[in-house]
Structures are given as structure tokens and as C-alpha cells.
Image: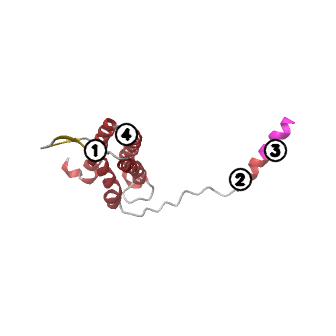
Amino acid sequence: MRIISIALTLLVLASCDSGEPVTETPYKPTTEMINLMNWILDPAADVIWGNSGWEMTELGEQELFPETDEEWQNLVNASAMIAESGNLLMMPGRENGADGRGEDWIAYSQAIVDTGNKLLEASQAKDKQAIFDIGGQLYRVCVACHQRYAYPDEQ
């Protein structure tokens, strides 16, 4: 009986193969690299940086962290946009993306994904100190990449 079950399983699995080659997903970037930065990644990073930390004013120290559930959700949304933006930077076919930049471009992009995911977790947990610290990590990744690619002559 066991041999019949194995034979039937193999027969079913064999019939699932259509014989056609698997094709890659037809990526089609919508924006140029500069617009991806200006319209998606930078605004999301600004949400993180504008909603974390402390500010000294004439009234004393004031927290910048969200206070309402809606404000926290904005931080969650921005964190997810950052993580996914890193994936968009690595997308095949994107102007100046993974196809032409090499391993360090992938490393910077992956660092954005990883940092965005950490921000997402911290935002969901409403962990103020982690958001502040990880926001600093995001800043360092962005600056390092910009020094390498956006402003290489200013090094």
C-alpha cells in the first residue's frame, strides 16, 4: 500500500510540471532614482527624524515622539516605506540600481531594508529610545551612501 501511495504522489507531482520555463517577474520601475529618493524614501525618513528625540526650547525640553495612536501609526507606515524603499533601490532594471552599481550599492540598500525593519518593530512597540537610536543608524546609512554616490567629489 505504501508503494502505491508513493507512486501516486510522484505521479501527481510530475503532472504539476507544465514544462514551461519559469519567467522572472516583469519589473517595471515607475520613477527615476532621484524621484524615488525625493518622493518616497526622504519623506519617510523625515517622518522618523521629525517624530523622535527631544528638543530644547525656551519652555524647556520637549519630546518629539508621537502621542496619539494615529501619530504612532504614521511612524509605523514610514518605517515600512523605508524598508520597502531599500528593496526598490535593489530592483533589477532601475536606473543606476543593482544592475550598474555593484556590491556596495546592494550593501547600502540592504542596510536600509534592515534599518527600516528595525524601525518598524520599534514603532509597533512604541519604543522611543529604540526609534531614536535606530533613526540615527538610518541617518548614518544615508550619509554613507550619499557620500559614495550622490556627492563622491566631496569626500
| Mark 4 Cα-neighbour bin, 10 Å: few <14, some 14–19, many ≥20 | many
Q: Examine the structure image and report whether residue 91 is included in the region drawn in magenta.
A: no
Mark 2 or mark 3, which is nearer the start of the sequence? 3
3D distance between C-alphas at marks 1 and 4: 20 Å
Q: Which disc is residue 139 wearing?
A: 1
Q: Which disc is residue 126 wearing?
A: 4
48, above or below 38, in the image: above
Dot 3: element: helix
The residue tagged 2 is 17
User: Which residue sits at x=12%, y=44%?
Assistant: 58
| Mark 3 Cα-neighbour bin, 10 Å: few <14, some 14–19, many ≥20 | few
The residue tagged 3 is 8
Instruction: Magenta stretch: give its range.
Output: 1-10
| Mark 2 Cα-neighbour bin, 10 Å: few <14, some 14–19, many ≥20 | few
The rendered magenta stretch, by its main secondary structure, is classed as: helix
- Residue closer to the observer: 43 or 31: 43
Mark 3 or mark 1, which is nearer the start of the sequence? 3
Q: Quadrant of the N terminus?
A: top right
> Which label lies toward us, 1 or 4?
4
3D distance between C-alphas at marks 3 and 4: 52 Å
Q: Amino acid at mark 2?
A: Asp
